[in-house]
Amino acid sequence: MLVLTDSDALIEADTLLLMLVLTDSDALIEADTLVLMLVLADWLADTDAEVL
């Protein structure tokens, strides 16, 4: 589990999710996971994160 302290990263994740117009709930879960992974990868590249 990662402790996120950068609110900009969370806002970016929300924005990307809103941009994905998906109606299939399974696809939404997969997209949510993928977007969070992409944002976390970018966030971790610029920020020190504490891994629990």
Image (tube, rainbow, N blue to C red):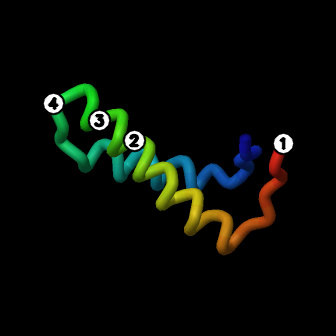
Q: Earlier in the sequence, mark 4 or mark 3?
A: 4
Q: Which residue is mark 1?
A: 52
Image quarter of the C terminus: top right
**Label 1–label 3 contact, CB within 8 A:** no
Amino acid at the residue labelled 2: Asp
Looking at the picture, tell me which residue is in the foreground, 8 or 32.
32
Few, some or many residues within 10 Å of mark 1 (<14, 14–19, 20+): few
Horizontal side of 44 relative to 23 (left or right) equals right
Identify the residue at image location x=25%, y=26%. Answer: 25
Instruction: Determine whether 1 is above or below 49 in the image.
Output: above
Amino acid at the residue labelled 3: Leu
Identify the residue at image location x=83%, y=52%. Answer: 50
Residues under labels 4 and 1: Cα distance? 33 Å
Count numbered badges in the picture.
4
Residues under labels 2 and 3: Cα distance? 6 Å
Return the x and y of residue 40 as percentages of the image width and height: 58, 57
Horizontal side of 32 relative to 44 (left or right) equals left
Horizontal side of 36 relative to 40 (left or right) equals left
**Label 2–label 3 contact, CB within 8 A:** yes
Q: Which residue is mark 3?
A: 28
The quarter of the displayed image where residue 49 is located:
bottom right
Q: Earlier in the sequence, mark 4 or mark 1?
A: 4
Instruction: Determine whether 29 is above or below 15 in the image.
Output: above
Amino acid at the residue labelled 4: Thr
Image quarter of the N terminus: top right
As drawn, the label of residue 32 is 2
Identify the residue at image location x=41%, y=51%. Answer: 34
Residues under labels 2 and 4: Cα distance? 13 Å
Local SS, label 1: loop
Q: Earlier in the sequence, mark 2 or mark 1?
A: 2
Q: Which residue is mark 4?
A: 23
Return the x and y of residue 6 as percentages of the image width and height: 68, 54
